[in-house]
Image (tube, grey):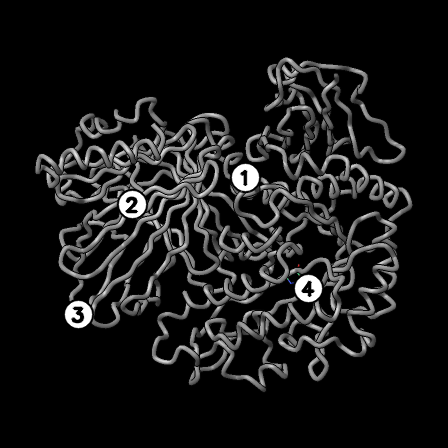
């Protein structure tokens, strides 16, 4: 039964039961189904809404009603362990999803089912809303479940409102409260710091609460992102086992609690962090929480990632189904030290290399306080007259004359104390009025809860496009965390600050996107300090890490790939690491390719290799950007890493192979089994990105069936002389 059919059936049942006067005893079962999975809610005779099932979809949806009978668990004690949105202050005994202080100071809440509704949003996308109401106070929560049928993905959030006499304080306001029954749960989480993003850790959850969270305000993912994997029954495997991948779509403080309760089940409560954020909600206003996005898989993490990546390309990331620009960036090539002449040379290099765009990084602005280092100038977005006497318009014109596009770096949310902006608008700066300032990279955040600051930030972007209408790309950076959180604008409502900052940021991004809907913008935060699906709906790509050592990037990009598609994962060839240019380029080609090197310093064969690599990338980028990704061989478990992309029609594929263990004799002794091909089709395999003057050991005259390639595999012949190998596979017709 589809959600729509179920709803009709449900309406019919309610009418029938109401006729016989038995409505109060009615049990209502509400399945949220996708192509192969189901989350099932149930309203009991007590009007409590509970999650009774998360797992494989059943052929007969009427059978969901019988699920609870089969669980013979220990006492619940409050009847709320599997509450679909656990309220607190009444009979609840565990971690709540919501905690409030009513207008009269009372802290209790007991949410009861009122109604539900299913709407079709678009083809294959439905929205279920369930309204709950407190049985004493005029207080309501609407739970929202947006399901994406094809991808087995659900976005879940809540909307809170009330009609009490004056403001209610929301002490806690989760987006989603899941409940999963199972025999043991393993959490895979990620931690990090600058240049160490997405370091994985996996552990078995024990009774009590494990929390992943951020209290950093901006650059919120610096120490950890909100993305996670929960495996049920055993630790996550790539192609087998039950797993849930999820993450909060929010670019600020978050909190995800994993509570193994007294019945040994998992209660998962995710949302904006309520740390220092008790929120004053006025009567009649709505408080919408950001979605928790998740996908369920019973075929391991690989299937789950492909679903999430496909969902992201089709529904979330800006221009997820579109194109991207390859580029040459000057950050590591020049740092702050450049002028018009130097940029002129870089534009020519961009053309020579064959990439689409030149990206001018930090250092182009500031006059009273020139941006010649990271300690001055942020906030003063006028071109530095010494470095760029003719302004960015002239650079953009020159780029056009050279046949390349032009992009620019900004960090519009931030200010250096050494700037005109700081002197002129101290009230726009996030800092405690009576305390010493404390800096992160010599800078402070601007108060984006303030509409005037939102306008200022919007105009930074708008005026760049007005000055240089051909501007084709922006890199939006955000390097500092928030210390001394305080907003002059919010006056006595300081505890709304962390929430309003992010809402202010999204307002600016929405306004920018209304005027410039498709221009590519890279989401950067001193590396991957702000990678989440809340932000990515406004951005075309993200910068995973300043760590571009290719060996490190194999691991970092591997971990991002659990949640994010390659089309959004920027990867640049730089001078980090000791590996030859081929290895560095081969790794960057696994994502959205760019370069950040001094071309003059390359030998002629290195230069020739890079130029050919760009040509090769253009021939395979379609499948990398829009194909399905298969993690074939993990660098954590093997001496090599293999990553594959296959197009939807299964006619072409690319496999990236890297030696990750440089000990004596390490090599690809066993063939790598490919995935996602058509067993019936025949394919030709060709090595690409072969370094000039060397020869491939792969025989491209050979044809092999998908059956062979997936069951026996192919050996990329990776060894100390061939540390990285890219194989292109094309169907032979
Ligand atoms: C941090 C970014 O991650 C770098 O790529 C670079 O843009 C610098 N900021 C510039 O200050």
SS at mark 2 in the image: strand
Q: CA distance from mark 3 to mark 1?
A: 45 Å
Quadrant that contains the C terminus: top right
Circle 2/circle 3 CB separation < 8 Å: no
| Residue identified by numbered label 1 | 309
Q: Position of residue 335 (x, y in %)?
A: 74, 65
Residue 340's spot in the image, x, y percent?
84, 69
Sequence order check, earlier mark of 4 and 3 = 3
Mark 1 to mark 2: distance in Å? 27 Å
- Ligand 1 neighbours mark 4 (CB distance < 8 Å): yes
Residue at image point 60% right, 77% down:
416
Report the residue marked by disc 3: 105
Q: CA distance from mark 4 to mark 2?
A: 42 Å
Task: Tell me, yes or no, whether the two marked residues, 4 and 1, touch with CB atoms within 8 Å.
Answer: no
Pick whichever of labels 1 and 2 is earlier in the sequence.
Answer: 2
Q: Which residue is mark 4?
A: 409
Q: Is residue 182 left or right of residue 466?
A: left
What element does badge 3 sit on?
loop
- State whether label 1 is within 8 Å of ligand 1: no
Residues packed near mark 1 inside 10 Å, few (<14), some (14 to 19) or many (20 plus):
many
CA neighbours of label 3 inside 10 A, class few (<14), some (14 to 19), many (20+) = few
Q: Residues within 10 Å of mark 4 (few under 14, many from 20)?
A: many
Q: Residue at x 46, y 72 (%)?
A: 449
The mark that comes first in sequence, 4 or 1, is 1
Answer with left or right where residue 445 lies relative to residue 394: left
In depth, the one of 639 and 544 nearer the eye is 544
94 vs 730, nearest the viewer: 730
Q: Which mark is residue 259?
A: 2
Residue 670 in view of the camera: yes
């Amino acid at each position: 039964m589809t959600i729509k059919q179920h709803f009709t059936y449900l309406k019919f049942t309610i009418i029938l039961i109401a006729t016989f006067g038995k409505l109060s005893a009615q049990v209502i079962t509400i399945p949220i189904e996708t192509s192969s999975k189901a989350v099932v809610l149930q309203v009991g005779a007590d009007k409590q809404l509970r999650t009774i099932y998360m797992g494989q979809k059943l052929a007969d949806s009427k059978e969901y009603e019988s699920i609870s009978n089969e669980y013979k668990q220990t006492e619940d004690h409050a009847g709320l362990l599997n509450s679909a949105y656990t309220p607190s202050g009444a009979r609840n005994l565990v971690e709540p999803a919501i905690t409030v202080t009513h207008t009269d100071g009372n802290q209790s809440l007991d949410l009861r089912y009122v109604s539900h509704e299913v709407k079709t949003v678009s083809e294959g996308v439905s929205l279920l809303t369930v309204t709950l109401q407190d049985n004493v106070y005029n207080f309501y929560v609407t739970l929202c479940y947006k399901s994406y049928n094809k991808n087995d993905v659900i976005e879940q959030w809540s909307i809170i409102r009330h009609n009490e006499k004056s403001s209610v304080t929301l002490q806690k306001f989760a987006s989603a409260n899941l409940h999963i029954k199972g025999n043991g749960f393993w959490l895979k989480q990620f931690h990090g710091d600058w240049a160490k993003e997405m370091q994985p850790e996996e552990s078995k959850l024990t009774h009590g609460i494990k929390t992943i969270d951020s209290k950093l305000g901006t650059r919120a993912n610096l120490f950890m992102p909100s993305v996670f994997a929960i495996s049920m029954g055993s630790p996550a495997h790539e192609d087998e086992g039950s797993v849930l991948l999820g993450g909060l779509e929010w670019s600020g403080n978050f909190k995800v609690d994993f509570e193994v309760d007294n019945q040994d089940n998992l209660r998962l409560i995710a949302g904006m962090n309520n740390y220092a954020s008790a929120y004053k909600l006025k009567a009649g206003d709505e408080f919408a929480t950001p979605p928790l996005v998740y996908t369920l898989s019973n075929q391991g993490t690989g299937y789950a990632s492909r679903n999430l990546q496909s969902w992201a390309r089709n529904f979330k990331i800006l221009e997820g189904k579109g194109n991207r620009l390859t580029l040459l960036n000057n950050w590591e090539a020049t740092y702050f030290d450049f002028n018009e002449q130097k940029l002129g040379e870089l534009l020519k290099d961009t053309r020579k290399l064959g990439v689409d765009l030149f990206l001018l990084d930090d250092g182009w602005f500031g006059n009273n306080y020139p941006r010649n280092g990271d300690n001055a100038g942020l906030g003063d977005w006028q071109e530095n007259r010494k470095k760029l006497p003719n302004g960015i318009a002239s650079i953009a014109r020159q780029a056009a004359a050279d046949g390349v596009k032009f992009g620019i770096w900004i960090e519009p949310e931030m200010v250096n104390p050494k700037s005109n902006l700081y002197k002129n608008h101290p009230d726009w700066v996030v800092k405690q009025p009576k305390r010493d300032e404390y800096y992160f990279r010599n800078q402070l955040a601007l108060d984006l809860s303030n509409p005037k600051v939102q306008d200022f930030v919007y105009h930074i972007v708008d005026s760049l496009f007005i000055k240089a209408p051909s501007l084709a790309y922006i890199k939006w950076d955000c390097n500092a965390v928030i210390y001394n959180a305080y907003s002059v604008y919010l006056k006595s409502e300081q505890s709304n600050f962390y929430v309003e900052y992010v809402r202010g940021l999204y307002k600016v991004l929405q306004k920018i996107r209304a005027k410039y809907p498709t221009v590519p913008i890279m989401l950067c935060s001193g590396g991957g300090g702000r990678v989440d699906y809340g932000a990515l709906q406004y951005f075309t790509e993200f910068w995973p890490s300043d760590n571009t050592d290719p060996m490190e990037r194999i691991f970092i990009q591997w971990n991002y790939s659990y949640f994010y598609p390659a089309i959004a994962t920027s990867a640049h060839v730089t001078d980090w690491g000791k590996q030859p240019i081929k290895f560095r380029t081969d790794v960057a080609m696994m994502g959205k390719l760019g370069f950040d090197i001094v071309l003059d310093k390359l030998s002629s064969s290195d230069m020739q290799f890079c130029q050919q690599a760009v040509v090769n990338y253009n021939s395979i980028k379609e499948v990398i950007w829009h194909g399905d990704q298969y993690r074939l061989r993990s660098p954590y478990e093997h001496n090599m890493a293999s990553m594959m992309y296959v197009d939807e029609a299964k006619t072409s594929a690319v496999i990236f192979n890297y030696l990750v263990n440089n000990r004596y004799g390490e090599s690809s002794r066993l063939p790598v089994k490919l995935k996602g091909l058509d067993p019936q089709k025949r394919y030709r395999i060709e090595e690409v990105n072969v370094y000039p003057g060397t020869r491939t050991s792969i025989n491209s005259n050979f044809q092999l069936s998908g059956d062979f390639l997936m069951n026996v595999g192919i050996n990329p012949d990776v060894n100390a002389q061939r540390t990285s190998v890219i194989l292109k596979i094309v169907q032979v017709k």
